[in-house]
Amino acid sequence: MANQVKQSMEMTQTMSKMMEMFLVTSLSISSRIERDESTDKPILILVTENKSQFPIPGLSGSLRIGNDDNKEKKFKCSTASLATIISKTYTMTKGGRQAEPQEMKHCIYQQHGARADEPQPSLDVLLPGMRCVEVFELSLERFDEWVILVDARFKSPGSGELLSKRHECCVYLIDQCSIKWLTVDGREASASELSQEAKMMTGPLRQILKVPVTAGVSVGMRFALFPLKSDKEIQGRVSHISENNQETSLSLWSEQSDAADSIILERIAIELGILGEHPAFG
C-alpha cells in the first residue's frame, strides 16, 4: 500500500514537472529594436505570447540594461540607462484569426531597480493565444553596445513553485544613430581619415539605413550617421553593388583619428553585416 502511494505521488510530481516544462517552453518572448521616427531614440518592442492551450497565471517580469564585462565574465547593470513604457497592447487569436489590439491595464515588465514603493506590475493571466506587445523608449547611459536581459516569472499551477524564462536582446551602435541621406557629390574618405568597409545584403539595407522610399540604391549615394550620445559624425557611401543587385558594399569613414573612433567604425561595419544578413556573418 505504501509503495502504491509513493508511486502515485512520484507520478503526480513527474506529471507536474512535465506540465511546468511545457508551460515555460510555450511562453514565447521575442524582441526587436527600432528607432522612434520623431526622436530618433531607440525603442524596444517586447512581445510575450502564450503558445499553449493552457492559461499562464500571474505573469510578471523585469528587464535590465547593461554590458557584458568580458574580463570579469559577468553582466554589469547600468542604473543610468532607462526603459520607459510608452505603449502596451494585447491581441487574442481564436480560430486562426487575430482580433484588434486592446490596451493592457498593466504591463508585464518593470525595469530592474525601480523604487520599492512602486507596485510590481503583473498580468492576471496570459490566456492561450494571447499576444502582448510592450514598447519601451530607451535612454542609454552612453554611446555603446548594450544588452537587455528580460526575465519573466509565474507560479506553477500545480506545485506553486516560481518558474522563469529569460530572453536577451542587443542594442547596437547603429540603433543609436540618427541617419541622414546626403546629395551625391563624389565625396570619399581621404588618406588622413579613418575608414572601414561594410558589406550587407541590399534588401535589409533599405530598412536598416532608412533609405528614402522614393530613392533607389545606387553607387555614390552618401549618408551620415549621428550618434545620439556623442558629438561624433560618421560618413558613409555606397561603394559597390553586385551585378545581381543582391549585395552592397559601403565605405564608412570619420574625420576623428583616435583609437576609439577606429573601434566604433569597425563595430558598426560588423553590425551592418550582421543586421544586413550578409553570408559572411551568418
Image (cartoon, rainbow, N blue to C red):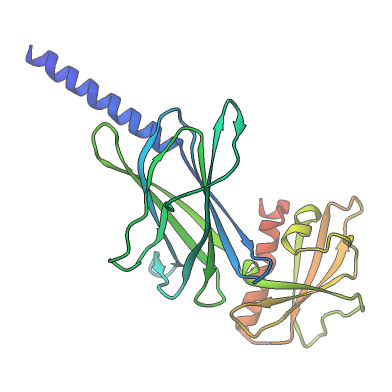
Q: Residue at x 62, y 31 (%)?
A: 97
Q: How many discs mark residues in the rendered view? A: 0
What residue sits 82% from the left and 55% below the top? 247
Q: Position of residue 151 (x, y in %)?
A: 40, 52
Q: Position of residue 87 (x, y in %)?
A: 53, 57
Is 126 placed left or right of 207 in the picture? left
| Looking at the image, residue 44 lies above or below residue 25 | below
Residue 134: percent from the left, percent from the top?
Answer: 51, 53
> Which is nearer the eye, 40 or 94?
94
The answer to which of 154 and 240 lies nearer the viewer is: 154
Q: Is residue 66 above or below residue 5?
A: below
Q: Position of residue 153 (x, y in %)?
A: 35, 47
On the rendered image, what quadrant is the N terminus found in?
Answer: top left
* Nearer to me, 127 or 217: 127
Q: Is residue 185 above or below residue 249?
A: below
- Residue drawn 69% across and 66% down? 37
Q: Is residue 15 above or below residue 75?
A: above
Where is residue 12, by image quadrant? Answer: top left
The quarter of the picture where residue 269 lies is bottom right
Residue sitting farthest toward the top = 1
The quadrant in which residue 57 appears is top left
Image-based side of 21 in relation to 267, left or right = left
Q: Residue at x 71, y 52 (%)?
A: 277
Q: Is residue 116 left or right of residue 202?
A: left
Instruction: Give left or right: position of 217 versus 133.
Output: right
Q: Residue furthest left?
A: 2
